[in-house]
């Protein structure tokens, strides 16, 4: 299974994603330059965190016009696995691959700390190794992670079980206190209707090694590999 | 034509300095040349006042690969790898425009690190403000934190540590000191030298605009009432541009095409060009018409003095220009040949075919004036040092005092600030903010690097020499508590107006204390930065010689943290708690006093304590270690409980007044915990090593309980502290956020 990590100008979690994928899955992984016109040969594409093009405009609003986004969108439409983390999630919503948008955090500050997530749907390629309702600890680091969608879209997301992760307390209770940024319905991550495109604000690559004190992030990369090898999902 | 004296005086040159320029050139300088001399001979760039004192600092040691004089210091960490690090101030800009001032402070220090060829892996910030009950202080604090967050998070270098202090003396003149740490393979080290006659000189990165002209001069005078008018001298940062510049520079350095490289920081193109030529003993010829510009109609003077951010000056091997341009083009950046290295030692600036300035490069650097300014002992010292601290009433309720101390912004959790910093990006942060020191792993090895910044300005105000020595000792102690061997120092010396003999005296005293401690603890100084004129309306900030220190963790499995680990573990105090209340946070909180003599520092004892604790962390005997600092033993114990999420039961002999026992800030004290069965082994080792210690009690329960016994005095003992850890933690964690509402 071959992973590709897209490098936009201003991406800063590209090296981290590459490292985590290598460490957890042991599979080949390469960078994909933002000017690249093709994503042929890759089985899973990761849009990493960072500040693409400085994000001086709405986050991700410029990156979605990068040449590489055309083949990424086609890849996703063909059912290819695409995962956007943090800025990657923002880019996916701007590119129309995922519904909704990410507003500024409710307290208007950048926030970096651990959060607890409840796995709401374990039938996707990104979560097939999890049990439903499992609580994992994954850190956030963003200024604009406050998920918003209009009521109709939100209803559909919930109905189709497209909400994959929800901010919760350590016991799995979805409470207002556990919501760091004001996201509607405590949403931390969603997928598209087909289930092959995931966007999430928390950073699983930051907690995938014991030396960093937390390995909960491994679950997501391991799920991707196992799904590909038809061992789960 | 003879120049009007007003011209050079407005640029900050004295009449005698102007005469010296005429003497060096053998003629009257023109306007551009005066501007160039004025910035290069400004205090900020020339260190003309501080140089005699700085020369007395120890700068050599077995691990030092690069001492003062380059863009940053370099320390060997084995395996052909090295740590590159430096600290710098951005005080004046931040006091006027906190967001951009702090942001460009981060940007500038990052460039100092990657210009050496190193990848920046961490940023630390040492910040000082007035008291938070003042709305303008809250505005400055919020702005500075947001600026650091905005720049550091965007470029993707984690902000992993630092310190924040609040005291009235910093009210108008906040201090923003930023330290950056980078990692490098020693074979890739680059320096700021313009070597190789005929080699092309290139300007790369952002375009040059009119921003920040005379920023260095602005940083070399007191902040006046009209300072706000200087806002245009503050630059605006573009972290996205810097991210591209960082990646492009590291890529081009890897190719071997680069001969020398330097950041265009203070005094922009002027300082980078003459410093690179001066170091190499060469000259430079540049045509300013070729420099990419942000706006039209800029004069040569403006181009030379612009402090537009995110620019670098490169000298590359002749014939590689096109390949270098290709790499920068890949990152959508300008890279333009603007001149070449010459053999005549002259900085020759042209605009097209016309020569607009011609100055010997060394005249701007080596030949800058040096001032041996007069010193005088400040009158306030005797009064504050002799304050009869022992005559103060003792508290009735120790629980209340402890909670007050934990809620004091100087002691309370700095989470409000560091939650806004991305401290994890890069996947190296093993010990996150909030412990004694931050620890980062070195990928691909078992090693870690530890880092901290420290300085208690109040101690330095009360006794500059001891205060500065304590800053060094505490930094080293913090590294030791995390399991690291202290290696080297970078310093940021923040003082008032050095033309005042009292300020100059405190400066020299601080340098003496620092030198003594650095020698004793074998942590040489590799460079840093001096910031004078931190003074408004005649009031100087507390002398604040901030110490940035890095250390090496040989084995990441042996990293130590401050939190108590397990119920039943035995708690010891290593070192000696003495009746020393002077300069304590307790005096400030309880009595509103910033007086008394700060705690004494015995460097022999300090060394012994540090060596013992480091050895026994490495041996695995010590399970937690935490330095006692502001708030004394009681606050340190509370912090061990908070971090460990567990209580402690402490019993101490009351050898002197209870408030001094609990809240005095004696130096060289470390609280450790060991397995309950290893207590005897520990004591034997302590006795063998001749290290003083006190057994304090046991880890366990949900509360911090501190009892005292008083042999020979029935009824004198009893319980002083009994507080649930939950209550302690709430008070400590929420205090600053509460004040910021």
Image (cartoon, coloured by chain):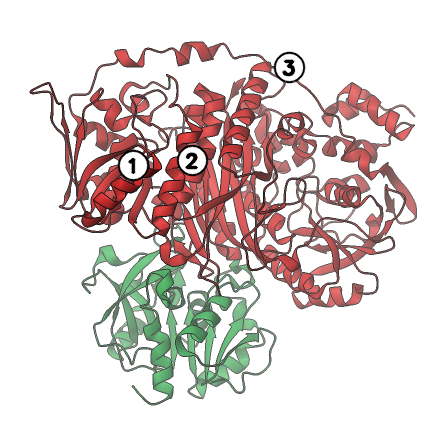
Chain colours: A green, B red
Q: Quadrant of the N terminus of chain B?
A: top right
Q: Which mark is residue B374?
A: 3
Label 3 vs 1, first from the N-terminus: 3
Secondary structure at badge 1 equals helix
Which quadrant of the structure image shows residue B657? Answer: top left
Q: Position of residue A226 (x, y in %)?
A: 34, 84
- Crowding around mark 3 (Cα neighbors within 10 Å: few <14, some 14 to 19, many 20+) is few
- Crowding around mark 2 (Cα neighbors within 10 Å: few <14, some 14 to 19, many 20+) is some
Q: Are discs 3 and 1 less than 8 Å apart at CB?
A: no
User: As displayed, is residue B410 above or below residue A155?
Assistant: above
Q: Position of residue B162 (x, y in %)?
A: 44, 42
Q: CA distance from mark 2 to mark 3?
A: 34 Å
Which quadrant of the structure image shows residue B59? Answer: top right
- Crowding around mark 1 (Cα neighbors within 10 Å: few <14, some 14 to 19, many 20+) is few
Observer-side mark, 1 or 2, equals: 1
**Relative to B649, is B68 on the left or the right?**
right
Give the labeled residue for mark 1: B687
């Amino acid at each position: 299974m071959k992973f590709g990590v897209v490098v936009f100008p201003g991406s800063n979690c590209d090296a981290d994603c590459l490292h985590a994928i290598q460490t957890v899955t042991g599979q080949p992984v390469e960078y994909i330059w933002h000017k690249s016109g093709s994503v042929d040969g890759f089985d899973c594409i990761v849009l990493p965190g960072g500040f693409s093009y400085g994000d001086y405009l709405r986050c991700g609003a410029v990156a979605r016009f990068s040449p590489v986004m055309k083949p990424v969108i086609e890849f996703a439409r063909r059912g290819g696995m695409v995962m956007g983390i943090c800025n990657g999630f923002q880019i996916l919503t701007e590119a129309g691959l995922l519904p909704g948008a990410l507003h500024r955090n409710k307290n208007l500050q950048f926030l970096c700390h651990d959060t607890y997530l409840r796995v709401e749907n374990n039938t996707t390629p990104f979560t097939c190794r999890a049990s439903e309702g499992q609580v994992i600890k994954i850190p956030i680091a963003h200024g604009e992670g406050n998920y918003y969608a209009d009521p109709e879209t939100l209803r559909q997301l919930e109905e189709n079980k497209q909400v994959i992760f929800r901010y919760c307390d350590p016991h799995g209770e979805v409470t207002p206190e556990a919501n760091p940024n004001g996201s509607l319905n405590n949403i931390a991550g969603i997928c598209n209707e087909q289930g092959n495109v995931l966007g999430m604000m928390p950073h699983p690559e930051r907690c995938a090694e014991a030396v960093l004190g937390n390995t909960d992030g491994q679950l997501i990369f391991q799920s991707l590999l196992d799904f590909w090898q038809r061992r789960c999902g | 034509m003879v120049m009007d004296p007003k011209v050079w005086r407005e640029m900050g040159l004295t009449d005698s300095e102007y005469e010296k320029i005429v003497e060096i050139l053998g003629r009257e300088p023109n306007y551009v040349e005066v501007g160039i001399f004025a910035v290069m001979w400004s205090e900020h760039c020339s260190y003309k006042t501080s140089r005699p004192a700085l020369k007395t600092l120890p700068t050599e040691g077995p691990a030092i690969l690069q001492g003062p004089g380059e863009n940053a210091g370099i320390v060997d960490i084995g395996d052909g790898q090295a740590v590159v690090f430096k600290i710098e101030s951005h005080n004046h800009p931040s006091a006027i425009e906190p967001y951009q001032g702090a942001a460009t402070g981060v940007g500038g220090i990052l460039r100092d690190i990657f210009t050496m060829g190193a990848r920046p892996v961490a940023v630390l910030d040492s910040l000082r403000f007035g008291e938070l009950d003042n709305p303008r202080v809250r505005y400055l604090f919020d702005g500075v934190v947001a600026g650091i967050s905005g720049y550091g998070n965007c470029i993707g270098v984690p902000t992993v540590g630092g310190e924040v202090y609040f005291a009235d003396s910093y009210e108008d003149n906040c201090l923003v000191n930023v330290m950056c740490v980078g990692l490098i393979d020693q074979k890739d080290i680059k320096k700021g030298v313009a070597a190789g006659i005929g080699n092309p000189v290139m300007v790369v990165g952002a375009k040059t605009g009119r921003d920040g002209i005379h920023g260095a001069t602005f940083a070399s005078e007191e902040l006046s009432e009209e300072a706000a008018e200087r806002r245009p001298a503050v630059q605006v940062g573009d972290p996205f541009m810097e991210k591209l510049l960082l990646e492009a520079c590291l890529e081009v350095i890897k190719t071997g095409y680069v001969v020398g490289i330097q950041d265009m920081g203070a005094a922009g193109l002027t300082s980078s060009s003459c410093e690179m030529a001066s170091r190499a003993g060469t000259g430079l010829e540049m045509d300013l018409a070729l420099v990419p510009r942000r706006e039209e109609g800029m004069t040569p003077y403006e181009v030379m003095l612009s402090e537009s951010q995110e620019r670098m000056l490169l000298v590359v091997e002749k014939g590689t220009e096109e390949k270098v341009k290709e790499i920068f083009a890949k990152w959508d950046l300008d890279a333009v040949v603007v001149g070449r290295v010459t053999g005549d030692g002259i900085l020759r600036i042209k605009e097209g075919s016309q020569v607009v300035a011609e100055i010997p490069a060394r005249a701007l650097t080596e030949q800058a004036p040096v001032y041996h300014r007069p010193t005088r002992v400040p009158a306030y010292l005797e009064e504050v040092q002799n304050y009869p601290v022992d005559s103060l009433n003792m508290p009735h309720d120790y629980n209340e005092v402890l909670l007050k101390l934990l809620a004091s912004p100087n002691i309370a959790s700095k989470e409000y600030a560091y939650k806004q910093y991305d401290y994890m990006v890069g996947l190296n942060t093993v010990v996150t903010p909030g412990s004694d020191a931050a620890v980062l792993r070195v990928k691909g090895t078992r090693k870690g690097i530890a880092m901290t910044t420290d300085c208690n300005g109040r101690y330095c105000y009360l006794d500059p020499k001891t205060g500065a020595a304590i800053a060094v000792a505490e930094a080293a102690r913090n590294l030791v508590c995390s399991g690291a061997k202290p290696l080297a120092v970078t310093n940021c010396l923040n003082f008032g107006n050095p033309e005042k003999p009292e300020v100059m005296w405190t400066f020299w005293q601080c340098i003496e204390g620092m030198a003594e401690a650095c020698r004793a603890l074998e942590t040489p100084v590799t460079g840093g930065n001096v910031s004078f004129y931190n003074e408004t309306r005649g009031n100087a900030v507390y002398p604040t010689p901030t110490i940035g220190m890095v250390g090496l963790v040989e084995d990441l499995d042996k990293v130590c943290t401050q939190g108590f680990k397990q119920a039943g573990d035995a708690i010891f105090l290593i070192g000696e708690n003495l009746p020393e209340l002077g300069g304590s946070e307790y005096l400030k909180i309880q009595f509103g006093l910033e007086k008394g003599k700060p705690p004494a520092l015995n460097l022999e004892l300090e060394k012994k304590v540090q060596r013992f604790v480091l050895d026994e962390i490495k041996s695995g005997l010590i399970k937690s270690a935490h330095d006692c600092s502001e708030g004394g033993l009681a606050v340190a114990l509370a912090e061990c409980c908070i971090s460990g999420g567990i209580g402690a039961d402490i019993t101490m002999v009351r050898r002197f007044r209870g408030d001094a026992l609990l809240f005095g800030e004696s130096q060289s004290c470390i609280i450790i915990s060991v397995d309950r069965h290893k207590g005897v082994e520990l004591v034997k080792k302590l006795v063998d090593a001749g290290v003083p210690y006190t057994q304090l009690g046991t880890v366990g329960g949900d509360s911090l309980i501190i009892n005292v016994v008083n042999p020979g005095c029935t009824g004198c003992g009893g319980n002083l502290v009994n507080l649930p850890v939950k209550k302690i933690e709430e008070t400590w964690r929420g205090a600053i956020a509460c004040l910021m509402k």
